[in-house]
Image: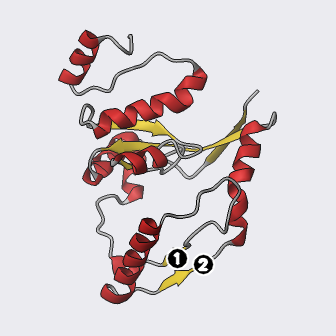
């Protein structure tokens, strides 16, 4: 399908189906994720499935006002947070849905909460925006004061190296992609040649 074909796009959006865009593998890794997010943010598609080894679900969702969930390297993207649970039920194999306990209410007062304010000054990483710092402070205060939950601030000093480690891994000839199945906790690693 042509990306610019107006009649094709009308047909797709009429049925609320996400468009399939033909691209090269390199383009697919970036552009397709962004295209999917734009369609969801514009209400042209109610949901989608993304793959994420470097933020391709989380970051576009964050910047475009949709909800993304990364339970493994594959996960749902939706316009509304309430759609994540039904999407997970569709994505996970039937025999494993009950193990996830998606319908069990979560008692927020029983959560163990740990947070980190920044990565410690990582290479090529922007500092955390003041608005995000304020939002984090509000969440921490809500857990502490309203829910009376013990909240622990941590500073994992080696976090500042994770960006460089990820870049080195992506560049390596011996790249290994570890995939964790949504339905199991079993890790499957394969070498990319």
**Residue at the image position 51 percent from the left and 41 percent from the top:** 56
Residue 39, image x and y in percent?
A: 32, 32
Label 2 Cα neighbours within 10 Å, binned few <14 / some 14-19 / many ≥20:
few
Residue 179: which quarter of the image? top right
Q: Could one spot residue 92 in this view of the protein?
A: no
Residue 32 to residue 89: above or below:
above
Helix or strand or loop: what does disc 2 sit on? loop
Residue 53, image x and y in percent?
A: 59, 43
In the rendered structure, which disc, 2 or 1, sits on the residue that comes first in sequence? 1
Helix or strand or loop: what does disc 1 sit on? strand
Residue 19: which quarter of the image? top left
Label 1 Cα neighbours within 10 Å, binned few <14 / some 14-19 / many ≥20:
few
**Residue at the image position 38 percent from the left and 15 percent from the top:** 3
Horizontal side, residue 44 vs residue 91: left or right: left
| Residue position for label 2 | 154
Q: In this view, which residue lies farthest toward the left?
A: 14
Marks 2 and 1 close (CB-CB < 8 Å): yes
Label of residue 114 in the image:
1
**Quarter in which the N terminus is drawn:** top left
Q: Could one spot residue 177 in this view of the protein?
A: yes
**Quarter in which the C terminus is drawn:** top right
Horizontal side, residue 23 vs residue 122: left or right: left
Cα separation, mark 2 vs mark 1, equals 7 Å
Label of residue 71 in the image:
none
**Residue at the image position 35 percent from the left and 13 percent from the top:** 4
């Amino acid at each position: 399908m042509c990306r610019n074909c107006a009649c094709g796009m009308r047909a797709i959006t009429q049925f609320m189906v996400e468009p399939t865009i033909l691209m090269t593998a390199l383009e697919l890794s970036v552009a397709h994720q962004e295209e999917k997010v734009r369609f969801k943010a514009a209400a042209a598609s109610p949901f989608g499935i993304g793959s994420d080894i470097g933020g391709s679900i989380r970051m576009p969702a964050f910047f475009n006002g949709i909800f993304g969930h990364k339970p493994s390297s594959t996960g749902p993207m939706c316009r509304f947070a309430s759609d994540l649970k039904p999407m997970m039920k569709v994505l996970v194999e039937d025999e494993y849905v009950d193990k996830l306990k998606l319908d069990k209410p979560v008692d927020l007062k029983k959560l163990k909460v740990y947070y980190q304010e920044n990565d410690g000054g990582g290479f090529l990483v922007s500092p955390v925006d003041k608005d995000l710092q304020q939002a984090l402070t509000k969440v921490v205060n809500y857990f502490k004061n309203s829910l009376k939950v013990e909240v622990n601030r941590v500073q994992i000093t080696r976090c500042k190296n994770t960006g460089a480690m990820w870049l080195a891994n992506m560049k390596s000839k011996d790249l290994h992609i570890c995939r964790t199945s949504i339905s199991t906790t079993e890790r499957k690693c394969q070498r990319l040649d």
